[in-house]
Image (tube, helix red, strand yellow):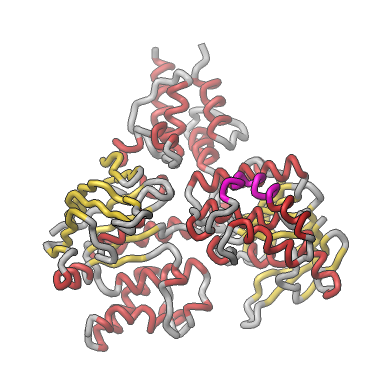
Amino acid sequence: MPIVIEKLTYTYQSGSVNAFTALKDIDLTIKDGEFVGLIGHTGSGKSTLIQQLNGLMQPTSGRVIVDGYDMSDKKQRAKGRSLVGMVFQYPDYQLFDETVYKDISFGPRNMKLDNDEIDRRVREAMRLVGLDFDEFAEKSPFELSGGEKRRTALAGIIAMYPKYLVLDEPMAGLDPAGRRAVLEMIDGFRSQLGCAVVMVSHSMDDIARSAEKVVVLRDGRIFTCGTPQEIFSLADELYEMGLEPPFAARMASDLRRRGLLLPHGIYTNEALAAALAEYKGGRGNA
Amino acid sequence: MLSVRNVSFSYDNGSRALNDVSLDIDRGEFVCIVGHNGSGKSTLAKMFNGLLLPTEGSVTVDGMDTADDEKMLDIRRLVGIVFQNPDNQIVTTVVREDVAFGPENLGVPPDIMAVRVDEALKAVGMESYAESAPHMLSGGQKQRIAIAGMLAMEPQVLILDEATAMLDPMGRRDILNIVRELNKQKGITVVMITQYMEEAVGTDRMIVMNDGSIVMEGTPAKVFARGDELRAIGLDVPPAVELRELLKQMDVADCGDAMTLQELSASICRSLLKN
């Protein structure tokens, strides 16, 4: 079953003079196994929204239903929450145990799995995130590089086999190869574990590569929602909102402005190069 | 201004982060250092103001050796560093006090300091936030405050150690523009360490690190012409350069050394829109 968000509104410090409504009237469904990209400028409500998904915060009005569990009900919330794995932007805040092994096994241990199953899952999770077991299992998380810490935090979450994986800026601070590796890793365990992924990222180029659905938040509301192709056709509007649409989408838009007739819906360099090749070929034939 | 001579550095656990690195950075230069995570670029950054001292070799700032204890204060005054995580750099509860924290420690008199703080906040476009609480600001605004805190010390060199890594695109654009202005208008020497290849475009010189050594050096145009070598060490080229490479391979257009959207777009139109 999916995650269903109905008419969700959330107000910080509701009722006080400092009351601030961060989310307004959000309707959104995250289907089983779906890859959803969530974008929006700082302060648009992205972080507030993802914290609703595992019941860290509860709606001021409206409902969040995770796999049939109503997250505003305390008992159901515990069940719903166990299905949602969250990885935050700063892995430093998420790692706390003496060794990488202990850190990754913390979640499965809390699930009261037996030791053999815990061991199997830790090894599997480490393999999926590309951490060599012999090299890293006994290391302290604090000896790790930024990229390794992030992998460890991810491994700790996927070892719990979440049905929905929520990632807040999983590529921030990584080098280009690290960014590619994390994206491939997410695709990898999505296909292996069948989990849905909700990824918050400033990099629309990264979202463009993997997401099936893109949700754009603006001032606490859903500004628009659709396929990458639909969303990135709005390159100019997104750019004016302070976002950075995929380079190829902005480039295509600029070329059109300069009088080059290109088809709409281009958002990768490969597609843009192909369209330009076709343009050149077509002109040659004419 | 900065001179790094045959510097090697090993951390306490024995891992070697820098291997015989030599480098000179001139006064007023805008230099960009790139390299994959763990390539040694952040270690190098911390050498520039003596936060780390070389295991072998020497680093001098305006002729002063960073290993000389007596020069430490002068060096810290000349070289300011802004780090990646803005939350770790904010120390007080009011923006104005935070910006004043550094100069206060250097013993700047209060009347002069008030002027400096105002100017620093103005330079980063945050003058209207002087009395705000730093924790209420966005990441980009916090980084601007961190930069203002450095400016209030009137440094001659500003080091940005992945200072834009955690910011949104708008925050990144703002910080880059501010730093470019400081370099151009005030002649402050800038060393920018980054993971974003497009940020290197427009700097005077790029330095590419790999496994503790400098492996490439030159103008961004020269370095980005070597895309395959960059990818081989876990780096990349800016998206405009990637598209340029594709167009050349497919024999669609030769766009020379265009590195930005505007340059590439103009160049493509020149070759495809001929009447």
Work out whether residue A280 can be spotted.
no
The vertical placement of B68 against B275, above or below, is below
Q: Quadrant of the C terminus of chain A?
A: top left
Residue A155 position by quadrant:
bottom left
Residue B91 drawn at (x, y percent) = 59, 66
Q: Looking at the image, which residue is at 62% across and 42% down?
A: B177
Q: Looking at the image, which residue is at 86% across and 73% down?
A: B70
Q: Looking at the image, which residue is at 51% across and 59% down?
A: A173
Which residue is more in the foreground, B243 or A158?
A158
Work out whether residue A234 can be spotted.
yes
Residue B50 drawn at (x, y percent) = 75, 69
Query: Is B121 part of what is drawn in magenta?
Result: yes
Residue A6 left/right relative to B52: left
Residue B181 left/right relative to A143: right
Which residue is more in the foreground, B153 or B115?
B115
Q: Which segment did they paint magenta?
A: B118-129
Which residue is more in the foreground, A101 or B173?
B173
Residue B81 drawn at (x, y percent) = 68, 60
Q: In the image as oriented, which residue stretches furthest toward the front?
A: A17
Q: Quadrant of the N terminus of chain A?
A: bottom left
Residue B51 position by quadrant:
bottom right
Residue A241 left/right relative to B261: left
Residue B17 position by quadrant:
bottom right
Q: Looking at the image, which residue is at 29% across and 57% down?
A: A14
The vertical placement of B102 against B25, above or below, is below
Residue A215 drawn at (x, y percent) = 30, 45
Q: How many numbered marks appear?
A: 0
The vertical placement of B112 against A237, above or below, is below
Q: Mostly what secondary structure, the magenta segment?
A: helix
